[in-house]
Every structure is written in structure tokens, then in C-alpha cells.
Image: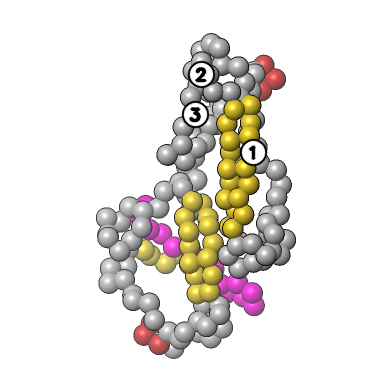
Amino acid sequence: MPEIDEIQNWNLVSGSENDTHSVLVFRRKLDTCDNDDRKIDDSTTRLIYAYSNEDPPSENGLKYHFKERGTKSVLLLQLKRSNQVKIDKSTLTYWDVLSPNFTIPSNSSTMYWCKIYKAPDLSEKNHVVLDLVLPEYVGLPLVPSPTKYYMMEIHYDNPHLIEGKS
């Protein structure tokens, strides 16, 4: 059985249940300053879950979940930008770097997709006026550079070998 955290830094707001779903709404500080808790930020968070088809008689009467368990990668927090300005893209030179619609093969738990993109000519000063969303450890030079090609690599995760997952 998992250990129950001695300090519960969350408050249950509401809960509901029907034939197919159990929903819990809770509140918690983004950073509890508790070494047993993880910070919540705007990066991808890997959640694990486990459940039983029977309600436990008490907090100490939890039953083993057997095969009812799994993992999910989610964004728990999406920061709102208060100063967003509408921009007409037809007046700009822009570079879209997009991934295609992709279905992960059901016989592979992890799939890597790579594509090489040619960068636009950056022979003069440029400005980013729309979203440029990259992980903290990734950067892209926006100055004149001899680098003309960039590779985008995406890792697709399908640990339960679900068919048709995209």
C-alpha cells in the first residue's frame, strides 16, 4: 500500500460519481514548500493513478487496485496572458513549425518522430510577436546565423499499447 502523506496540503472542493466517472475537484498551492509534494507549474506533469471498483470502508481500509492503474501526461496549469494583442498574420512573415496528425503504433510504447525544417532567412533583426513556446532547456537563435536547418523531435508515449492513440 502507498504511504499516506502526513501533511495533506490540499482541500477537497467537491466530488461526484456516476456509472463511469469519479470526479474530485480540489485546491492546493502551486508550491506547498513540502518536500513530499511536487510543485505545480505550466510544464507537462506525469500523473499516476490507481482505483478499485469498490469504495473503501475507511481511509485505512484501502484495497489493492490490481490492474486498475495507469499513467497520464497532462498540463495541470496553463498560464493566462493578460496582455495578449490580436495580430493580423497576413501582414507578417512567419514560420510555422508544426507536427502532423500522428497515430502511435499499438505495438510500441514509445515512438520518436523527427523532421528537419529549413529556417527562414534571418539576415536582419527580427521580433517574435506571437507565441514561441519552448521548454526551459531549449532555445532558438533569432539573430543572423549560419544555421539554416533545425530538427524537431517529438516523443509520443503509449505505455499501455492503446490502439488508435493519436
Q: Is residue 53 magenta?
A: no
Q: Secondary structure at mark 3?
A: loop
Q: Position of residue 85 (x, y in %)?
A: 56, 26
Instruction: For label 1, count other residues whose C-alpha is less than 10 Å away and answer few (under 14), some (14-19) or many (20+).
Output: few
The residue sitting at 46% across, 32% down in the picture is 139
Q: Does 82 appear above or below 24?
A: above
Q: How many marks?
A: 3
The residue sitting at 56% across, 83% down in the picture is 53
Q: Position of residue 21 (x, y in %)?
A: 60, 72
Of pointers 3 and 1, the one earlier in the residue sequence: 1
Q: Secondary structure at mark 1?
A: strand
Mark number displayed over residue 145:
2
**Which residues are the magenta region?**
14-30
Q: Is residue 15 magenta?
A: yes
Q: Which residue is mark 3?
A: 140
Q: Does 38 appear above or below 50?
A: above
Q: Secondary structure at mark 2?
A: loop
Of pointers 1 and 2, the one earlier in the residue sequence: 1
The residue sitting at 40% across, 87% down in the picture is 61
Q: Is residue 91 left or right of residue 60?
A: right
**Which amino acid, by three-letter code, is at mark 3?**
Leu
The Cα atoms of the two marked residues, 3 and 1, are separated by 16 Å
Q: Main secondary structure of the magenta part?
A: strand
The Cα atoms of the two marked residues, 1 and 2, are separated by 20 Å
Q: Which residue is mark 1?
A: 115
**Which amino acid, by three-letter code, is at mark 1?**
Lys
**Which amino acid, by three-letter code, is at mark 2?**
Ser
Q: Report if the CB atoms under discs 1 and 2 are less than 8 Å apart.
A: no
Q: Does 140 appear above or below 66?
A: above
Q: Position of residue 42 (x, y in %)?
A: 45, 46
